[in-house]
Amino acid sequence: MTGKLILSIFEAMSGKVYLIGAGPGDPGLLTLRGKEILECAAVVVYDRLVSPAILGMCNPRAKMVDVGKMPTHHKVKQSEINKLLVQFAIENPSGIVARLKGGDPFVFGRGGEEALELVSAGVEFEVVPGITSAISVPAYAGIPVSHRGIATSFHIITGHEKDNAEISLDFENLAKCQGTLIFLMGIANMDFIAKRLIECGKDPKTPLAFIEKGTTPYQRTVMATLETAGETIARENVTAPAITIMGGVVELGKTLAWKKNLPLSGKRLVVTRAAKQASGISARLGALGAEVIETPMIETHTLDCPYVIPAKAGISFESLANFDILAFTSTNGVESFFKQLFAAGYDVRVLAGKKIASVGRITEKKLLEYGIRCDYVPEDHTGEGLGKLLRCILDESDLTSSLSLPKGTASTSLDESRILLLQGNLADDTLLKILPKATRWIVYETLPVTELPEWKRESVASADAVVFASTSAVENFVQAVRSQETGVGSVSGACNLKPETSFCIGRMTEASAKKYGFETVTSDETTMDSLVKKIVEYYTKEP
């Protein structure tokens, strides 16, 4: 039994609030426990610094509540957040309320204040620790917070006081401290802090580093000394979120810095593929340094009652005996077909003796997961390419049969009417135009995503580019963005959309994106590999 299932069965009835640490930014640093809870939560109350990729892991039906704080502006006051947690727990007695906080809830995360409010209200809670930025961010910059012979202790210090009160740290003892000093949330006050430490006797030459947006694709490390702290922040425009680490261990960062500046570092890309298909390209773009916002613009559902085009007597798995070639045009078609096949009580033996065709290598790979090897895969991975390949096979079969069989012998040539096309409801008529006698069996339906949640809309608007793999993705994306910005359902005509740059697979997708005013960059081939290559080329080209 999986942890997710255990949560849903045994804990969903508890009505507990979970104080979850999201870690420093890299979604890979979220704990497994945290992910399990987010996948089941009925309500997620989240902070500004939580990665969009982590928000994307939340239960899609969850109520998402943004209480994010800016350094000089609180969207929701802490006292109000405390009351909200109690309110949501009362409103969801059989649900899970997740309080998602950057870093660790109990390391300057005010998790203790929230927990005290829950105790006072009689609400059960659990703390799910997160990886604190105080240790992980320096590690991503190659700076160990402790090192034998340099620092035998480290100290985590807040860089600002509650409600912007004057900094009242024990500067005299901090100045005498021989260990590593780590200041969180203190960039705005660091000039004052540095001067006070020097006044209290700390060596002005003490090395320090400002690490901006640590563990994310936007990470930047700026070196300085205690006496140059203020001027360095101003000159290099160091901004929050950033931590300051101070002490001899900082020098190790010059040698141990391991996080590479990858080709797509600092780029935020919106991937609009269906959720089941997005992970492949998302992983590749992420490995190249990009921050990926998965924003599928369609949802697919296996049909309980598949139907036939052209309209004729319904077919079933028993009637598969009437077909010699089964042609799959998508991974969704493969998954839906086998889901229906198994649900009907059959297995792959019903495909014995049949030829299997795939529109491309990705669909071919999906078939192999079910133990099925393809007989036909076109070089041109499109519906037209598949249709032409099957037409060529049919024509060659007719010619071979007529030349090789003795007079009066029954023909064994392939029959076009014995081809079954496994497709979705939005598939175009390309294959039926090339193979008009074939039968099209609709095994899944595709529905457009008509709106984006607020957290995703903000992330999308700030992205560098959007990735489109189909014309429907373009249409649905524009529809979702425009309908929420203007309240207008129509998507006709060019419009000012953000991001402005799009990466497209295929000329039809490119034409659709241009229609709405996107700057387009199109892959040389209709494959994800070609598209990823084109994205890298675009961002690494010489200025």
Image (cartoon, grey):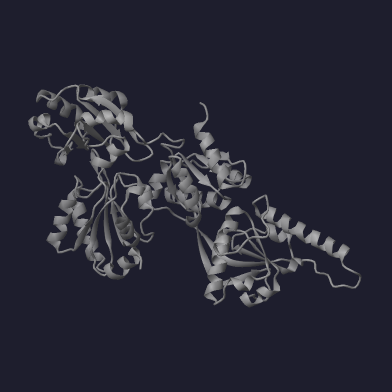
Furthest toward the right, the residue is: 407
In the rendered image, residue 379, in percent from the top left (x then y), is placed at 67, 50
- Taking the spot 56% from the left edge, 47% from the top edge, the residue there is 528
Q: Nearer the viewer, residue 417 or 376?
A: 376
Q: Which quarter of the image is occupied by the N terminus?
A: bottom left
Q: How many marks?
A: 0
Is residue 2 left or right of 275 when viewed as pictured? left
Q: Nearer the viewer, residue 371 or 181?
A: 371
Whether residue 286 is visible to the viewer of this picture, yes or no, is yes
- Please determine whether, in this image, residue 469 is positioned above or below residue 210: below
Is residue 301 left or right of 118 when viewed as pictured? right
Place residue 434 in its image quadrant. bottom right
In the rendered image, residue 460, in percent from the top left (x then y), is placed at 42, 45
Place residue 251 in its image quadrant. top left
Is residue 249 left or right of 165 when viewed as pictured? right
- Taking the spot 60% from the left edge, 64% from the top edge, the residue there is 372
- Please determine whether, in this image, residue 349 is positioned above or below residue 153: below
- Taking the spot 12% from the left edge, 26% from the top edge, the residue there is 196
Whether residue 449 is visible to the viewer of this picture, yes or no, is no
- Taking the spot 60% from the left edge, 67% from the top edge, the residue there is 442
In the rendered image, residue 391, in percent from the top left (x then y), is placed at 75, 58
Q: Nearer the viewer, residue 116 or 5?
A: 5
Q: Nearer the viewer, residue 382 or 361?
A: 361
- Please determine whether, in this image, residue 531 is positioned above or below residue 394: above
